[in-house]
Amino acid sequence: MRDADSLKKARKMRENMPEPEMRMWLELRAARFRGVKFRRQKVVGKFIVDFAANHPKLVIEIDGDTHAGRESYDMQRSRFLEEQGYRVIRFSNSDVMSNMEGVLQQLGLVMDEMVSPPPTPSPEGEGALSSRLPGYR
């Protein structure tokens, strides 16, 4: 698909969003979620992703029943997006429709993880993981 074709298709997809995507968009648009600017139906390479932010580089995919049996394709797509520097998180239509609070909580945890560096191992002693595990010597 050429760039112009992808942009045209993305524009059409924005006009005809399924209800779960629309509900998610209402939570994300205008930097409503943690001040992060998300775009909907963003073209990344040859793919159109549901939602994407540049800072942090995060893609949110809302998967419906049409994704059943397409796990291999979704993995390939996620791999490509990760190679472009994005972290990909997926939610099901049913989670968005019935548990938006849980979806947003999970999204927040992922975003926290992305902006906070992972803890560095501490030397043995105060605060070391091994000193906090029961029965560890």
Image: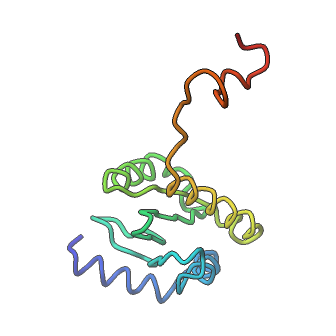
Q: Give how far across and how far down residue 19 sits, in percent.
A: 63, 80
Residue 9 position, x and y percent, is 35, 80
Question: What residue is shown at x 63% (from left), y 57% (from top)?
Answer: 109
Image quarter where the C terminus lies is: top right
- What quarter of the picture does the N terminus occupy? bottom left
Name the residue at the top extreme.
137
Residue 41: quadrant of the picture: bottom left
Q: Residue at x 25, y 79 (%)?
A: 5
The coloring applied to the image is rainbow
x, y (%) of residue 77?
39, 54
Q: Is residue 9 above or below residue 15?
A: above
Looking at the rendered structure, the number of numbered marks drawn on it comes to 0
Residue furthest to the bottom: 15
Residue 46 x %, y %: 28, 65
Q: Is residue 116 left or right of residue 27?
A: left
The quarter of the displayed image where residue 84 is located: bottom left
* Residue in the image at 53% along x and 57% along y: 89
Q: Residue at x 44, y 48 (%)?
A: 75
The answer to whether 124 is drawn above or below residue 29 in the figure is above
